[in-house]
Amino acid sequence: MGKALEDVKVADFTWVVAGPLCVRYLADFGAQVIHVETGTRIDPIRYTPPYKDDIPGTNRSGYFHNYNSNKYGITLNLRHPKALELVKKLVLWADIVAENFNPGVMKRLGLGYEEIKEIKPDIIMISLGSKGQTGPQARLPAFGAHLAALSGFTHITGWPDRDPPVTFGAYTDSIAGRFGAATLLAALDYRRRTGKGQYIDLSQSEAGIQFLIPPLLDYDVNGRILERDGNRNPSAAPHGAYRCKGEDRWCAIAVFRDEEWQAMRQVMGNPPWAEDDKFATFLGRKSNEEELDNLIEQWTINYSAEEVMNRLQQAGVSAGVVETAEDLHSDPQLKSRHHFWTLKHQEIGESTYDSLGSQLSKTPAELYKAAHTLGEDNHYVYTQILGLSDEGFVELLQQGGFD
């Protein structure tokens, strides 16, 4: 069975999260990807835990591995006199060039869109900049929590009586990577129809803002600023995470309609307090939310999170265990969909990778190659794909061309 993107070739100059994730989407569906790194400025995510067996190392980060599976990995010292010649070979081979450095970096290296378009006129290039390639803040450095704050997420996350928390991980990177994959598919379709490539200027911040449209519209039409409100939702009550039986076990529950509340009452055994008129309607429950949350937790604390979830779900009430990493690994739903894959890595051996959640019936995604060690595929890529002779490869190696 053929792969959906088996004829697509990507020169991947990305690092950290947004870029590698974007390209991995293509790789999982069959695109051939050459990931270009340098040993003189190693991708910081290679030094980001978790590490296999808690032993740090350039090739041991699970974080790096998860975003760079299904790719060939090479190193190239872009300051070497012959580097540009090799990059030209790579561009001629590729359909797509992807990068997410600060604006101007690729151009200074002679690899801006105008330059690579001269090498290959129908090339598609994507830049996943933190704030895009233009504007007064475009060149400001940004990473993870910084972008989440600039994009509005930090202000609305957490409790009203506490400082705004820093979001976990590179949140906007994760959003932007997925938007980037979609725009690349659109550009590939355009090239298929017209024979022309194009440049994609994707702002990670603006991609993230797409998830904040309701509060933006509320401010636009009502002048109202959404504030931190813990686990509460303006359209639901009860709505929150409730302590269950066991150490640090919780179940999230959301009730939007009065019919759901009636169903939840029955699951709880119709306790006398639930018959109080002040809880009969949404507005009543919303006005007495703190008391309601405390009373519900007096019920949930007697049962495991899984039992609370199952009983409520069977009654048509939205509920879900607050799962830990251990829970996710053993989750029967994820197992049934083959979400996790086991691949053998050159240095750390067998390790778990997750899929990207999209299943195509005719051309399914597949994880077949563990993430590369630094420069793992140098000889194969330079000699078998880019046409460098063995002698030329050894010469460049000795000259530091692959540092």
Image (tube, rainbow, N blue to C red):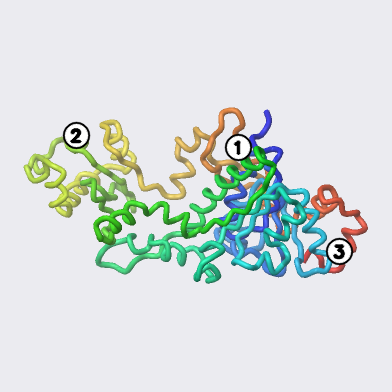
Mark 2 vs 1, N-terminal side: 2
Residue found 42% across the figure and 62% down from its top = 151
Residue hosting label 3: 396
Which residue type carries mark 3? Leu
Residue furthest to the front: 194
Q: Residue at x 28, y 44 (%)?
A: 253
Give x and y (percent) for residue 345.
68, 49
Neighbour tally class for label 1: few under 14, some 14-19, many 20 plus, Cα within 10 Å: many
Quarter of the image with the N terminus in it: top right
Q: Secondary structure at mark 2?
A: helix
Q: Who is closer to the viewer here, 220 or 291? A: 220
Q: CA distance from mark 2 to mark 1?
A: 40 Å
Which numbered circle lies on residue 365? 1
Label 2 to label 3: alpha-carbon separation = 71 Å
Q: Amino acid at mark 1?
A: Ala
Q: Position of residue 162 (x, y in %)?
A: 28, 67
The answer to which quarter of the image holds residue 63 is bottom right
Evaluate whether residue 317 shows in this view: yes
The quadrant of the rendering that contains the C terminus is: bottom right
Q: Which mark is residue 259?
A: 2
Q: Is residue 33 left or right of residue 287?
A: right
| Residue 334 place in picture, x, y as percent | 48, 38
First in sequence: mark 2 vs mark 3:
2
Horizontal side, residue 79 vs residue 148: left or right = right
**Crowding near pointer 3: few (<14 within 10 Å), some, many (20+)?**
some
For marks 3 and 1, give the CA distance: 36 Å
**Are the residues flagged by discs 3 and 1 in contact, CB closer than 8 Å?**
no
Position in image of residue 313 (x %, y %): 30, 34
Residue at 27% across, 32% down: 316
**Residue at 56% from the left image edge and 63% from the top image edge:** 133
User: Can residue 52 be spotted in the picture?
Assistant: no
| Disc ID at residue 195 | none
